[in-house]
Image: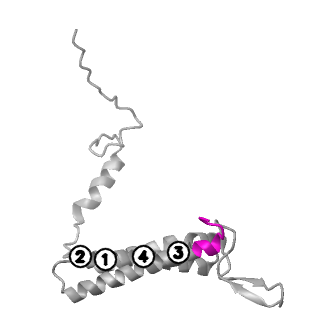
């Protein structure tokens, strides 16, 4: 047996008659007067407004903003704002009693000084820029000397970022991967 087709009709109630703008049923004459009277002699002004033109930013601008955002995220800016750690720390030498500055917060993986986060974030960004330079070195439309310059700078940046990041980890966690 085939199912019956049902038609849904919404009953009109007193609370829903003004919710639909196409529903103009009202018994109030003041409502009709206020709705029609001002618009019978008032005319909207003829404005000559121009639509503002918005130009898209250049690719380099977008890349710079994304790179800056990436730097701030990996540097731990949110952590620095919430926890408010000091810029650098200090430790006292056991033998001389002199106070030495400390850049890395030793032994705590989930804590950092501000300079520690910025330097680590800079190394991550440096490695990313190195990879971008390696990608630019593969462009066929560039001169060979420019491609060699991009490739050598890219390799140097990636290697330097890797070595420095591993050094930072070894300072932070002395027994890491040993």
Figure check: 172 above or below 38: below
Q: Position of residue 59 (x, y in %)?
A: 27, 77
Compare marks 3 and 2 and give the one earlier in the sequence. Answer: 2
List the residue tagged with mark 3: 165
**SS for callout 3:** helix
List the residue tagged with mark 1: 134
The residue under the point 38% across, 73% down is 66
Of residue 115 and residue 31, the one placed in the foreground of this image is 115
Q: CA distance from mark 4 to mark 1?
A: 11 Å
Number of numbered discs: 4
The residue under the point 28% across, 74% down is 135
Of residue 155 and residue 113, the one placed in the foreground of this image is 155
Q: Position of residue 105 (x, y in %)?
A: 68, 75
Q: Position of residue 149 (x, y in %)?
A: 29, 87
Dot 1, crowdedness within 10 Å: few (<14), some or many (≥20)?
A: many
Residue 127, numbered circle: 4
Q: How is the image coloured?
A: one colour
Would you identify the image quadrant in which residue 76 lies? bottom right
Q: Is residue 47 left or right of residue 103?
A: left
Where are the magenta residues, as a range?
Answer: 168-178
């Amino acid at each position: 047996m085939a199912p019956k087709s049902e038609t849904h009709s919404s009953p009109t109630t007193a609370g829903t008659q003004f919710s639909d703008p196409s529903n103009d049923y009202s018994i109030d004459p003041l409502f009709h007067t206020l709705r029609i009277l001002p618009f019978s002699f008032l005319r909207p002004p003829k404005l000559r407004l121009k639509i503002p033109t918005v130009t898209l930013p250049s690719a380099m601008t977008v890349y710079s903003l994304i790179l800056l955002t990436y730097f701030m995220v990996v540097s731990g800016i949110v952590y620095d704002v919430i926890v408010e750690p000091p810029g650098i720390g200090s430790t006292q030498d056991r033998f001389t009693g002199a106070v030495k500055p400390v850049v890395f917060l030793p032994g705590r993986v989930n804590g950092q000084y501000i300079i520690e986060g910025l330097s680590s974030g800079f190394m991550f960004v440096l490695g990313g820029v190195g990879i971008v330079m390696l990608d630019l070195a593969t462009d066929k439309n560039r001169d060979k000397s420019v491609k060699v310059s991009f490739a050598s700078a890219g390799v140097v940046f990636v290697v330097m970022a890797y070595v420095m990041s591993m050094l930072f980890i070894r300072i932070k966690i002395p027994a890491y991967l040993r």
